Image (cartoon, rainbow, N blue to C red):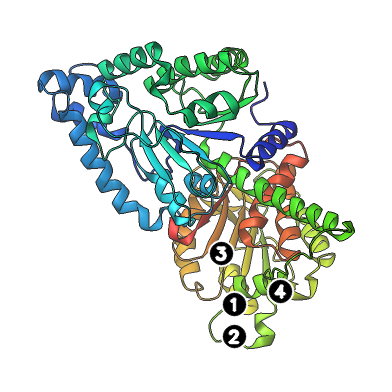
Amino acid sequence: MPDILEERDWNFLLRKIKDGKCTPFLGAGAYSGEIPVSFIANEWAKKYDYPMGDSYDLTQVAQFVAVTEEDALTPKDEICKKIKELVEEVTPKYFKNPDELHGVLADLPLPVYITTNYDDLMVRALKSRGKTPIQEICRWNECLMQRKPILSDFVPTPEKPLVYHIHGCYEIPESLVLTEDDYFDFFVANSREHDRFPPCVQDALTGTSLLLLGYRVTDWDFRVLFRILAGYLGRSVSRKHISVQFVPENIPETQKEKAKKYLDRYFANLHIQVYWHGCREFASELRTRWEIFNLDTIKNIGSMHGIARNSEPMKTITYPTNTDRFKAEYKRPGQIEEEANMVSILFLAADPTDASRLRLGEEFREIQEKLKLAKLRDNFRLELPQMSVRPSDISQALLDTQPQIVHFSGHGTPTGALCFENLVGKAHPIGPDALAALFEQFSGQVNCVVLNACYAEIQAKAIAKHIKYVIGMNQAIGDKAAIAFATGFYQALGGGRSIDDAYRLGCVQIQLQNIPEHLTPVLIKEFQS
């Protein structure tokens, strides 16, 4: 199987989502890093003097705590308190990031969401989208069987979806499947009685395509869940499913490839297509593709309506125009109308003589060409390119042109420095703190910085403390991919798309060139830094 989803897989997934025939499964990898539940294992290992070497394994450490404390609820009570604190802390800003997985999923017209996580972030995400989710837990032990269940005839809808916690929720400590004993009991209970899941959940397991998100095949939650799912999938009509899996870690590259091939064959038996990347990358690509898919659907419906003889008149819906979005994106305090309608783009480039040659001129020409052909070409001014830039040239160019967008093309180092040129044309690296301090002085003027250079994500995170949008590369990037990204990015801006959309279309442009580097560009926003 390929490492990424092919176009036919994406088309399949989008159609299933549109029809409400897709059911997301959320694992621990669905977090964006703000709720580090896995770190709790290390804290407990130190606190309770855990003697084994696998202090990172939450299930094993929790079992040890339950046994040594002679109370099965001790680790559950502790982890529930910790999760509650973390959820309350991050929720106010968590869903502001347009690429956050829970928010992306909440925007989809789906009736059922299933999670093995203990938090209620999926519920909160749905509520933030104006929906009314119903929350339910799996009744996997006798204590939980005594609790009043949701109505057996409940039919979830996209407006009133079900969020089903298979492994429990932090609001009910006894519902958590946490220790080794819990996982064994959970598996036995669900193997003996297939009606432990509500009818609507059983229908989702057998009648929809599953989207497994953020699991590692070595994790307890996935191993137990997969064996139970295998029983349901074996009883259903043969359907395609998709799993976003983390690449196996801490093993040599050759072994990693062998592990992936083995797992691909393992999943293939149940018609599961694997996407070997993180959830953040998947969420970003899903959001972009869903938006484009929806726009195409709306256009098709509009065209069909225009030729239908007996249809009712379509209601007029007012959408923001390209110009409206343009003004909202780039407007600065105190600007007069003429200034608000013009965006200045400053292109900076450096190609030191003691570094490998780059095609920087070609990148500038592509940007220039795309803006010339753009619908909003009269709203963009591409300044004369600043080539062979030295450190002192940067601030002078910012003062002279007063740009809203600054684009740097050149070399970057693994430590995050960008390479400019010294007086004799050789590399002069500038670290993240120095450039961040410079852009801080222009934070009221510059709206977006594009660092089209290797390893520039480190630099981007530093600059994003002061600038609204910053794009960097999370690893080395080739010339062709860098030029393709710039082409797609400015083509989208010239068409009136937002910087968020332009970033995604830049990544898609890399894919369209059949270059396997579309996950290298990273967009960092001011509130994320």
User: Real-space Cα distance between discs 2 and 4?
Assistant: 16 Å
As drawn, 254 above or below 97: above
Which amino acid type is marked by label 1? Answer: Lys
User: Real-space Cα distance between discs 1 and 3?
Assistant: 29 Å
User: Real-space Cα distance between discs 1 and 2?
Assistant: 7 Å
Residue drawn at 43 percent across, 32 percent down: 27
Which amino acid type is marked by label 2? Answer: Gln
CB atoms at circles 1 and 2 under 8 Å apart? yes
Badge number at residue 276: none
Residue drawn at 53 percent across, 54 percent down: 98
Residue drawn at 75 percent across, 55 percent down: 298
Which amino acid type is marked by label 3? Answer: Pro
User: Real-space Cα distance between discs 3 and 2?
Assistant: 29 Å
Residue 345 seen in this snapshot:
yes
Q: Which residue is mark 2?
A: 335
Mark 1 / mark 3, whichever is N-terminal? 1
Residue drawn at 71 percent across, 48 percent down: 293
The quarter holding residue 330 reads bottom right
Q: Which residue is mark 3?
A: 391
* Mark 1: few/some/many CA within 10 Å (<14, 14-19, 20+): some
Mark 4 / mark 3, whichever is N-terminal? 4
**What secondary structure is found at the residue carrying circle 1?**
loop
Percent x, y for residue 192? 38, 11
Mark 3 / mark 2, whichever is N-terminal? 2
Q: Which residue is mark 4?
A: 323
User: Real-space Cα distance between discs 4 and 3?
Assistant: 36 Å
